[in-house]
Amino acid sequence: MKSPATTPARAEIVVDLDALRHNVRTLKERVEGTGLMVVVKADGYGHGMLPVARAAREAGADWLGVAVLDEALALREAGDEGPLLCWLAVPGEDYRPAVENDVDVTAYTVPELDEIRAAARAAGRIARVQLKIDTGLSRGGSTPEAWPDLVAAALAAETAGEVRVTGVWSHFACSDEPEHPANDAQEQVFRWAVDLAERAGLRPEVRHLANSAAALSRPSSWFDLVRCGIAAYGLTPMPEVAGSEELGLVPAMTVRSMLAVVKGVPAGSGVSYGHTYVVPHDTTVGVVPIGYGDGIPRHGSSKAPLLVAGQVRRIAGRVCMDQIVVDLGGDDAAPGDPVVLFGPGKDGEPTAQDWADACGTISYEIVTRIGGRMQRRYVGATEGATG
Ligand SMILES: *Cc1c(COP(=O)(O)O)cnc(C)c1O
């Protein structure tokens, strides 16, 4: 990611930190009385992890969450000192810096817990560990069968003065479909797992299960803490149920570029690789200098929308590595005119959800993958933040 230059940006990602703070406050109010973790993994879903983390804390995020240890350590290096959880490690992971920096790490299995214990001994510090139970996602986490052994091992590690079990948590598979029977089933397994851990003598500070969709649709799943990613960025986690505006959320990311070239092409001309789009009549085309090398999904070929020359148009033909073409239909347009790929949708521009629908994916993937050679620029009250 380049830092902003003084010349007009060929292509830029504008992140509105006021929108982000608004979303964090909205979520906090929504789950009143329950803690809020803002998930800033994957470079803050493409918005820039450090500025997003700072803004989230300013707006009252009680916890931050990341996937991998490197992300957690980058937050600590940038000065973040608040509660921070990470949840994805590999065998042989070096947990010591995490233990030394008071990062909550997650154990799925006894061998993982053993590695964390070894790091705690090496660091001469008590490791903060959360235990994850797989309640039905069949991804990471202890199976229910292995849970009693993991709990027993964690108790032994507490007794040995090596760890403190700070949390018990799990993750939903289908919370974007509030009526899906898996939600109730997972919640039930989670209650069983928490109960077993507490009866065994663990005293976790936080028990948590809900992601954005569950935070917005399922109060029974809130427990002590909800973990919100996508909603904090202003996008709906459940597009089939409610749009972001309906949820009171404001999309924080706008992606803009400009027309690099405008020229006439005669009827019957094939446009871009493979000639999958053929212009039906004499027209003008505009070239936008961004492509899949900047994270534009090639699946958006002839489908994804952009606002240019006063109206929303579809990409004409294939998305190339560095360029896309748009059929301007002879409308008034000149090189240098702005092109908006997506944004909050307030000024007629498409949204990240529109892009997700056009590309057969979810808004999470759209905002997270966009970037490449684009510049990122921050607006909102925090001054001079770059990422
Ligand atoms: C990414 C992630 C989240 C956030 O999910 P959203 O749907 O973006 O709110 C929460 N918990 C875990 C474990 C995650 O990996």
Image: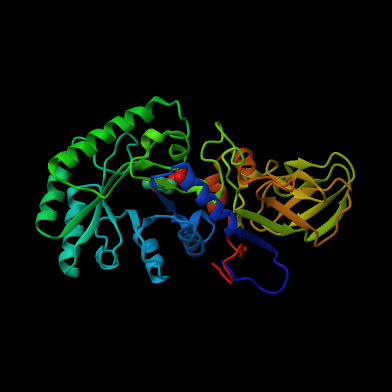
Q: Point out the image quarter for the N terminus.
A: bottom right
Left or right: where 237 falls relative to 196: right
What is the total number of numbered labels drawn onto the structure image? 0
Which residue sits at x=24%, y=66%? 96
Is residue 169 depicted above or below 123 in this figure?
above
* Residue 105 place in picture, x, y as percent: 28, 56
Residue, far bottom = 6
Q: Quadrant of residue 157?
A: bottom left
Q: Point out the image quarter for the C terminus.
A: bottom right
Please state which of residues 333 and 270 is positioned toward the viewer in this rendering: 333
One can see residue 267 in this view: yes
Is residue 52 depicted above or below 153 in this figure?
below
* Residue 359 place in picture, x, y as percent: 61, 41
* Residue 135 place in picture, x, y as percent: 30, 35
One can see residue 146 in this view: no
Which residue sits at x=57%, y=45%? 249
* Residue 317 place in picture, x, y as percent: 72, 45
Instruction: State the scheme by which the image is colored.
Output: rainbow
Please state which of residues 183 and 200 is positioned toward the viewer in this rendering: 200
Left or right: where 111 falls relative to 305: left
Please state which of residues 268 and 290 is positioned toward the viewer in this rendering: 290
